[in-house]
Amino acid sequence: MNRIFSGVQPTGNLHLGNYLGAIKNWVSLQKDFECIFCIVDLHAITIKQDPKELESNTLEVTAAYLASGIDSKKTIIFNQSSVSSHSELTWLLSCFTPLGWLNRMTQFKEKAGKKKDNAVLGLYSYPVLMASDILAYKATHVPVGEDQKQHLELSRDIAGAFNKAYNVEFFPLPEPQIFGQATRVMSLRNGLNKMSKSDESDYSRINITDTKDLINLKIQKAKTDPHPLPSKKDELTNRPEAANLLGIYSALNNKKLEDVIAEMAGKDFSSFKKILGDLVISKIEPISKKMNDYLKNKDYLKKILKEGSEKANKISNENLLEIKKIIGLLII
């Protein structure tokens, strides 16, 4: 049985990067996999969160999942903190995770920066919780962006270390799934930086909840260079903003980047931005409208999460019990 696990943090302002890099691809995965999609609220609290906003953002992500086409009848949707096995398994797996492995994680170094000694333990051990998220369900495949690939490799290492320690083949080694174009959507203000919720400038990203007029404005203001669009892919090497906008168009249109480059070759950015703006609006505006409809019925969203957590608890608790038995923990 092939099983997918993935999740998004409920930190507000879901944007085009979240949609193209994750949620859009998840919708198609439902056809061929048993899918478990989580709102990873425990990961979110590695950075201080406003309690009311955290709860509200959790429901917003749930609404975004549903509005984008994730089917709660086929797919398990739940918030991470409602399934205690994630936290419990994190401790068990941390006992199989050498500090050297964690010290190699580049994302901790980037986020902690020069204030490493003041960083919270949760930020440092975040990759072990991510491994627990995946391994609690014995997931076989994990859709990841390039920036999470290292953490998935660690998950595979931890699974392998556990299997080797007890001479078992309990955990499958989860395989990464990195999809097509625009798996890493960049800022509209700087093509070298990833599109991010935390960027101070709202013009750096297209939020899923943006209005038609705001989407158009942001696309028109997006940073570009003075040259026409290229005719060959290798001409994008030193043109990050052009590569980003063409990648977004490619992903939204489900076309190969090479075909998009051929289609747009020689156009000026002004003309291309009009085409791109219309395309983004056609794809994002319907999702935004459905999200707003779902958010008017928060009781329904909570019901979806409750039903999902019950299903997730059943799977993960059965696996956790087996893990405890393998380790030799007394089951009473």
Image (tube, helix red, strand yellow):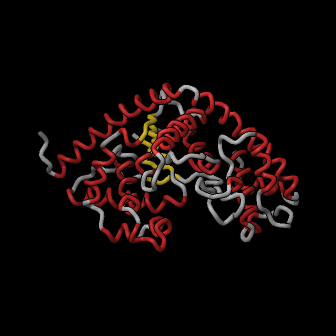
In screen coordinates, is 169 left or right of 121?
left
Image quadrant in which the N terminus is located:
top left
In this view of the protein, can residue 128 be seen by the observer?
A: yes
The vertical placement of 10 against 147, above or below, is above
Residue that lies at the very extreme toward the bottom in this rendered image: 114
The x and y percentages for residue 115 are 45, 71
The x and y percentages for residue 318 are 26, 38
Image quadrant in which the C terminus is located:
top left
Residue shown at the point (64%, 58%) measured from the top left: 200
The x and y percentages for residue 260 are 77, 53
Foreground residue among 203 and 165: 203
Foreground residue among 94 and 162: 94
Residue shown at the point (48%, 60%) measured from the top left: 149
Residue shown at the point (27%, 42%) measured from the top left: 319
Foreground residue among 320 and 157: 320
In this view of the protein, can residue 156 be seen by the observer?
A: no
Residue shown at the point (51%, 38%) measured from the top left: 56
